[in-house]
Image: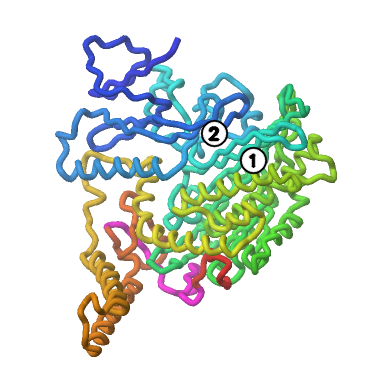
Amino acid sequence: MVDSLTIHRDSGRMELNAPPIAGIQMLQEVVVYGIMGFVQLHAGEYMIVITGYEHVGTLRGCDILRATTFQILPLPHNLSRLSEVQIEDEQTYVHLLQDHLRQNTFYYSYTYDLTRSIQQQAESGYNSEPMWKMADSRFYWNRYFSDKMISVTESGEQDLSPFILPVIQGFVDITSTVINNHPVTFGLISRRSRERAGTRYFSRGLDDSGHASNFVETEQLAFCEREPSGQGHPYQLSFVQTRGSVPGVWGQVTNTRYTPQLWVEGDLGDRHVLDTSRTHFNEQLRIYGPQILVNLVNKKGYEYPVGQLYARIVDALAEPRLRYIHFDFHHECRKMRWNRVQLLIDELEPELTKQGYCCIDPNSVPSKRQSSVVRTNCMDCLDRTNVVQSALARWVLNRQLRDIGVLSSTEVIENDAQFMSIFNNTWADNADVLSLAYSGTGALKTDYTRTGKRTYAGALNDLSNSLIRYVKNNYMDGARQDGIDLFLGMYTVESSPFTSPFAKKKHWKVHAIPTGFFASISLFLTILFSPEKLAIESSTVYILLLSFCFAIAITCWRYIQQHGTEFVDWPKLKPILFPTESAVKENGRQLRVTPPERSNTAMLDEVEQGYELPTLKKTT
């Protein structure tokens, strides 16, 4: 029997296997491949459904799918009971949800739990519980939207489990290939955590609950047939790594400069500050076991206080299960010598050997387990992090394939050009997708990940991506952060009392000054290169107009630089609080800016500003 689910628009009530309703008029027919869930807005509930998908691959005989198109279906018939302001807000909320669905990648399976690694699945046992009950809530991206169906199911009123579909946000790639005549299914799954999700500059460090920004669990899979014929069951090999923001209290205040103002809460004598990091690591130790902490930030310049904070936190915690390694990636790999990542691998080799990996033998019995995890970070946990994670994954894969006899003791996977193309491109695609979700652009340094070489063309592409990141992170990320907060339930729409979060408008200067800047630049260039278009014949007038336009441009630019926070696109739904000393009001939200003093909270001056720049420029 095929179950059906009926949602009554007037009441929002869900009914399982409801009898047909006589005389009902069909308004529209939509093919639905899954229900993301329900969200409450001003007019009522909206149902978000998956209307298109593409097949990614197969794991354990289960189809893995990527959702490609969605529809947001309103349950209320109209918006007649809303005020004009509420109608405008309603449209804004829907657009935020649409943009979030369009700008990110979502994966699901009807029969395979994408939220958990194969080691977690094996250790919890294979039982008949519905998948949503077993799902790891950290990576269950639509968990908030599923609340309505879960509540009905848990109440015992109706069992809606067949319609509750856990969806992850991140990256999944599955490729079938052959290594030494052995059929192999190679896969990579990156699960982004929803617990402190956000955009690059609006989400850094830890929250009060110890959740890290941009936390991602990445699982590399290799399902290898033990016989070249491909008959029988394969070995199932898994290796898990994590990444996440430096686990302390720190952040960056966007101010329209290329590198935002950095603050670091370094008072570890404050019990709350250290306890936040302790809470984070307690959870990581509980889930993954001992932690090998690889810190890739610079040991000098702008990033130094963040790296110093991390080292001091580990020392203060005095937890023997934390092994801390600070590898200054930019320094060690300067002048495009990216092969020097091997220095880090050599240092970690004893730990990696001890750590092991998960192996489920052809009889479906776990024969090996991974006993710890490498947690890698740089400033963004994107570009440098992905290079190092892919190198670690390649080292472990060599060991796995030797252990099961696919490679001999003297062979290395790097000699298989066909497979290495798959491996490199999979990890580079993973970098791009995770970077798009957090920073708004593809990843930097992917030329090395794809080809094993650092090129000047790749460095120029990094420069382009860095400039695009600057524009998006300063002037466009507020709306992206709002979409994340609305989708994950960090912000809920209240119908009464009603205060529009979008009501406060920016001062006229915020619109006029950038317009004046670009207009003066355009006019300056026109006068400089095409004076005949303006019929300028007098050299005096020519020089005066050039000087005037140049002066206007410089004045506008200096004002923007001096009042940078006024021009930033701040999130409007959920306040951002920077735990520093003096507070000012920005766009109706609390924004705190630290005076430039070197005390427990470190604030860096402009001389030290520097970030994840392409290697065309010397990093200090």
Q: Amino acid at mark 1?
A: Gln
Q: Which mark is residue 220?
A: 1
Question: Is residue 258 depicted above or below 56 in this figure?
Answer: below
- Range shown magenta: 588-608
- Comes first in the chain, label 1 or label 2: 2
Image position, residue 425 (x, y; %): 60, 47
Q: Residue at x 47, y 51 (%)?
A: 438
Q: Quadrant of residue 256?
A: bottom left
Cα–Cα span, label 1 and label 2: 15 Å
Q: Residue at x 42, y 56 (%)?
A: 202
Q: Which residue is mark 2?
A: 56
Q: Is residue 543 magenta?
A: no
Image position, residue 95 (x, y; %): 30, 43
In the rendered image, is residue 438 in sight? yes
Question: Is residue 201 depicted above or below 96 in this figure?
Answer: below
Classify residue 270 as left or right of residue 335: left
Q: Secondary structure at mark 1?
A: strand
